[in-house]
Amino acid sequence: MQLGLIGLGKMGGNMRERIRRAGHTVIGYDRDPDLTDVKSLAALVEQLDAPRVVWVMVPAGHPTQSVVDELGDLLSPGDTVVDGGNSRWTDDEKHAAELGIKGIGFVDAGVSGGVWGLQNGYALMVGGDKEHVERLQPIFESLKPEGPYGYVHAGRVGAGHFSKMVHNGIEYAMMQAYAEGWELLEKANSVDNVREVYRSWQQGTVIRSWLLDLAVNALDEDEHLEQLKGFAQDSGEGRWTVEAAIDHAVPLPAITSSLFARFASRQDDSPQMKMIAALRNQFGGHAVESVKE
Amino acid sequence: MQLGLIGLGKMGGNMRERIRRAGHTVIGYDRDPDLTDVKSLAALVEQLDAPRVVWVMVPAGHPTQSVVDELGDLLSPGDTVVDGGNSRWTDDEKHAAELGIKGIGFVDAGVSGGVWGLQNGYALMVGGDKEHVERLQPIFESLKPEGPYGYVHAGRVGAGHFSKMVHNGIEYAMMQAYAEGWELLEKANSVDNVREVYRSWQQGTVIRSWLLDLAVNALDEDEHLEQLKGFAQDSGEGRWTVEAAIDHAVPLPAITSSLFARFASRQDDSPQMKMIAALRNQFGGHAVESVKE
Amino acid sequence: MQLGLIGLGKMGGNMRERIRRAGHTVIGYDRDPDLTDVKSLAALVEQLDAPRVVWVMVPAGHPTQSVVDELGDLLSPGDTVVDGGNSRWTDDEKHAAELGIKGIGFVDAGVSGGVWGLQNGYALMVGGDKEHVERLQPIFESLKPEGPYGYVHAGRVGAGHFSKMVHNGIEYAMMQAYAEGWELLEKANSVDNVREVYRSWQQGTVIRSWLLDLAVNALDEDEHLEQLKGFAQDSGEGRWTVEAAIDHAVPLPAITSSLFARFASRQDDSPQMKMIAALRNQFGGHAVESVKE
Amino acid sequence: MQLGLIGLGKMGGNMRERIRRAGHTVIGYDRDPDLTDVKSLAALVEQLDAPRVVWVMVPAGHPTQSVVDELGDLLSPGDTVVDGGNSRWTDDEKHAAELGIKGIGFVDAGVSGGVWGLQNGYALMVGGDKEHVERLQPIFESLKPEGPYGYVHAGRVGAGHFSKMVHNGIEYAMMQAYAEGWELLEKANSVDNVREVYRSWQQGTVIRSWLLDLAVNALDEDEHLEQLKGFAQDSGEGRWTVEAAIDHAVPLPAITSSLFARFASRQDDSPQMKMIAALRNQFGGHAVESVKE
C-alpha cells in the first residue's frame, strides 16, 4: 500500500527503508532537503491517493502539534493520521478530537526498537478505533519483528502511547537494577571479574534479558566503563509514567527512584545535599566540605 | 567423576539427576530415607574414593553449618567441599577457614535455575581457589546450560554466593518493574487488554526478557491475577544485597524499594500508616478510618 | 478594614472569627444559609466599599474557578481577590491573568494551621504584586501567629501556594519519618515502652518538633494505635509537589516515598504484589498465598 | 555522687562540665594528657569508692570494646559501667554479658545534644536492669534538659542505643525532607526568597521544629549555601537503623532513601549511572557524556 511518512530522522529514515523492503510505497517528507522525497507537506498529500494514510514521526510536543494542525487543513474526510512519535497520551486525545471533527481518523503508535529496528523490526503498541487501525495493518506488519509478538492493538486512542510510556518506565527500572548490581559487584572484595559474572548470567538465570546482553556488550567495549561519565538524560516517558501513576494513585517506587537517580546524575553539586551539610554543620562539629577546600 | 551430594530436596534431587545424565557417579545423602542413597554422612564419605568431592545442597544457616562441621570431621586433607546452597557470602569465609585448617578445600557455588534447571541447566557462579574450582570442572560442565554462558569463576571464596546474591537483588527490582508497570496499565482507562500488551513486548522491545515471558505465562493462566493475593515472601538474598550495599556505601534505591514492597505486602495492616493516620487526626479534621467502622 | 470572605467551612469560619477579633469587619458568604452573612455573592460585593478586598476560601479546582469567574463579573477595577484555598500554583497564574484583564488584583495565600489556627494563628505564605499584597497587610497581621514569624511574601503570583505546597510535601516526609521510627521501635525486642521514648524526645533532641508533640498526644490517647487502621488519604499538595519536582528535575526520594506509602495504604490488596507473587509462582515452587486459601 | 568518665573529647568534656555544675564529683580519664584528670584507667578506678560507676564515652566499636575489656579486669562485683557512646545495640548485649559474668552491671545510654548539650542539656535514652539504671539516676538528672522530658528508661540492655539509633534514623529523613523542599523552592520561578519562606515556617505551621530553626540559621549565614559542597557523611546509626528494619521486615522507605542520598553525595562520579549511560549508548543514538569531552 501507499504511505506518507513525515520525519525522516534516524527513526523515520530506517522505518521508510523497512516498509519499502516489504514492498509498500513510501513518500517521505522532511524539512531537510537531503532526506525528503517531496518539497512540502502539501506536495506529499497531493501525491497520495485518497483515502490517504500519513505517518507522523517527528518529536513530541510542538513539532507534532504543528504537523497535526497542518494535516488537518490538507487532508480530506476518510484519511487517517498515525502519530508514531513519542507523544504524551493526553495529546493523542486532543489530536484525535481535532482531526475527528474533520472526518479524519487518528491512530497513535508507540514504537520501540531504536537503531536495531531496521534489521530486527520495531515493536508496535497501537491505540485507536478498530476501523482506523485495520487500514494500517499492512504497514504494521511490515514494521514489526518476524514472529508472533511485537504488535498489539492496546485499546482506544492514547492506549498505544500509554503502553509505550509504561514500557519505558519499566525499562528505567530494569536498567537501574542492572546498574545497581554492577556497582555493588565492582565494590565487592571477593569478586575479581564482574564482566564475566554479567556474561555468565546470559543463560540459565532468572535475569537474562536483552538489556543484560547490551550490558555485556558495553563491558566488552570498556570493562570498567572508565570512558563514560555517570550522567544520564531522561526522556519524557519516564516522567509521564510517574505522573500517570500519581493520577491513578499507584505507588511506583522502583521506577520513580530510577528517574530520580537520573535527575541526580546530572547535577554537578546537589543543592539538597548542601542543605544536609549545612544542618549537620549547625548541630555541630561535623566535618563539612566547604567549596573553598 | 565421582561426587557426594548432600541434600536431595527439589533442587538437589534434580541436580543429582542432571549430573548422572552426564555420566558421572553421584552418591546422594538425605535425611529422608526415601531419597537417600546411603544411610549416613559417614557412609557417604566412606563410599567415595579420595580425594573426595562433596557438594552440600542444604538450607543456609544452621543446616549448612552443621553439615560443614560434620564433614570437617569426616573428610581428609585433599578433599573438597562445595556449598551450593544459598549461604551468605560471609559464611563462606568462615567455612573455608574452618575446613582449610584441616587441609580440606572449599568452593562456594551460587546456583540459579529453579524447577527449570533439570531441563535447561543451572547457571553457576563459583568462588574459591583455582585448584579447588578446577577439580569440580566436570561437574560444573554437567550442570550448566548448553552454550557459552551460564558459568563463571567469579573470584575467591565467597564470590560465588556474592554474585548469586546480587543476581537475586537485580531479580527483585526487575520483578518490581514489571509489577509496577502492570498495575499502572490495569488502571489506565484507554488500555483494554493489558495481557496482550505484555505479550507483544516479547519481541522487538527493550524490555524483553525471560521474566517477561513468565509474566505472560502467568497472565495466560489468570488474566487479572484474581486468584492470587498481593503477598510476597522474600528470601535472605534480597536482604543481604541491601546489607552489602550499606557496607560498601552503595545507593541501591530500586532494589531496596522492591524489598520494602515485599515487606509491606505481608502486613495485614501497616503500623506506620496507623501513625500517619493518627497524626492527621491530631492536626485536625481529617477523615480517618477507625477499626470500629 | 473591611473584608469579604467566601467560604465559611471549618477553616473559613474560624478565620472570620479570628479576623473579627482583631477589629476588622468581615462580611462572609457561604452557600449554607446557616453560615452566611449575606444571601449571594452579588450581595456581598454590594455591601463592600470600593476598592474591595475579597478572600476566597473554597475547595481548589472547580469551586474556586467558578467563584473567581463570578467575581470577575461582579468586581470593579481596583478591587483585589485573595485565593486562600489549596489551589495548585498553576491555577493562580490563570486566575491572575483572568482578573488582571479587568483591572482586578490577585493574591494567592497558602494557609497553614488547621483546627489550631483560631487560637494560635495561621501561618501565611503569600504571592502577588507588592501593591496588592500591601493592601491585605492588616488582614494578614490579624491572621498570623503572634511573634516574628508565620508570614512571608514569598514572591510573585503563585509563590504563596507553591510555598504552601512544598510545606505540605515536607510535612509528608516528616510524618513518614516519625511513623517509620515508631513501627521499628514497636518491633524491637529490647524496647518496652515506645510511647515513653517518643515522649522523652520532646526535649534536648535533634528531632523535637510540633509533629512529635502531636505523635505523643496520639500515643497518649491510644498507646499502640489499636483503634486506627493504617489508612491515609493524601491531598493534592503532596502529588503536586512531586509533579513540580519532576518539572524541575529535582530528585525527591523521601517525599515521594511518603506519598507512595499513602497510596499503598489505601489498597485492600496490592495489584503489583499479585504480579510479584505470580512471577515467583512461575519460576517455581515458591509458596504463594492464593485467594482461595 | 562520684562518677568516673572515660573519654573527654567534645562530648565527654562538656558532659563532665555539666555534671560537675550539678554538684557531682567527676574523675575524668582521656589518653590526651591535656584533658585527663588521672594517668590511667587503673588510677581512675583506684580513685573511685566502691561501688563504682564508670561512664564510657569513646567511639563505638574497637575503642569501646577495649575499654570495656579493661574495665572488666579492673572493676569489682557491684560496680556499674555505662556506655554513653554510639555503640550498636548488638554490642550492648555482648558487653552486658561479658561484665555480668564478673558481677559488674551494664547500662547503655543513647545521648543526644551535640554542642548545644552543655547549655541545654542532653536527651538520654537508657537501657538496662532497673537496679543498675537507678544507681545512675542522679547523673542522668544532671545531664538531661530541665523540664519533664529528655529522659527515658526505654527497656532492657540495648534499648537505649536502639532508641537513639532510631532517633537518628528519623533525623536523617527529617533533614532530607527540609533539604528536598529547599531545593525545589530554589528552583521555582515564582518564589523570590526561599530563606524568608523557611523563616516564616517557624511559627504556626505543621513543620515547625528545631531542625527548621537550624535551617534558618544556616540560610542566614549563607543564603544559597554557596560556601558548602553537597557532600554529607553518615554515621553508623543511619546504617544500623536500616539493618534493624531489614531484620524485622519493616519497610523504611523515607529513612533509607535519605541514607542513600548521602551515599550518592560522596561519589565524585556514580558508577551505577555510568552503566545507565552505557546501556543508553548501546540501544542507540542517545547522547552520552564521555570522560574525554
Image (tube, coloured by chain):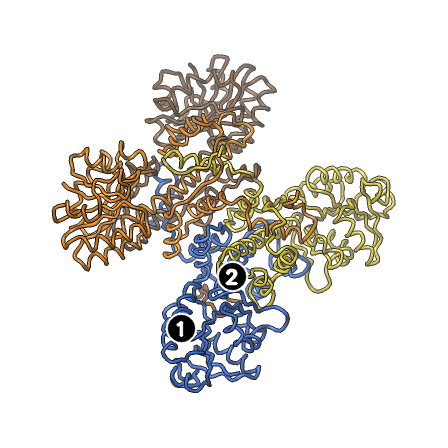
Chain colours: A brown, B orange, C yellow, D blue
Residue B231 sits above or below residue A272 on the image: above
C-alpha gap between disc 2 and disc 1: 21 Å
B207, above or below D178, in the image: above
x and y percentages locating residue B234 in the rendered image: 41, 44
**Chain under disc 1:** D
Residue bearing the label numbered 1: D99
Q: Quadrant of the N terminus of chain B?
A: top left
Circle 1: element type: helix
Query: In the image shown, does C50 or C64 lie closer to the viewer?
Result: C64
Q: Are marks 2 and 1 on the same chain?
A: no
**Quadrant of res D44:** bottom left
Nearest the eye: C3 or D25: D25
In this rendering, position of residue D212 left or right of residue A197? right
- Secondary element under disc 2, as helix, strand or loop, is loop
What crowding class fits label 1: few (fewer than 14 Cα within 10 Å), some (14-19), or many (20 or more)?
A: many
Q: Residue at x 42, y 63 (%)?
A: D90
Q: Amino acid at mark 2?
A: Val
- Chain containing the residue with disc 2: C
Give the number of the disc on residue C191.
2
Residue at 34 percent across and 22 percent down: it is A146
Residue C194 in sight from this viewpoint = yes
Counting the numbered discs, the total is 2
Residue drawn at (29%, 48%) of the image: B161
Residue C131 located left or right of residue D105: right
Q: Amino acid at mark 1?
A: Leu
Residue D216 appearing in the image: no
Quadrant for the C terminus of chain B, please: top right
* Residue C270 in the image, given as x and y percentages of width and height: 51, 38
- Please provide percent x and percent y for residue C103: 76, 43
Residue A180, position as x, y percentages in the image: 38, 47
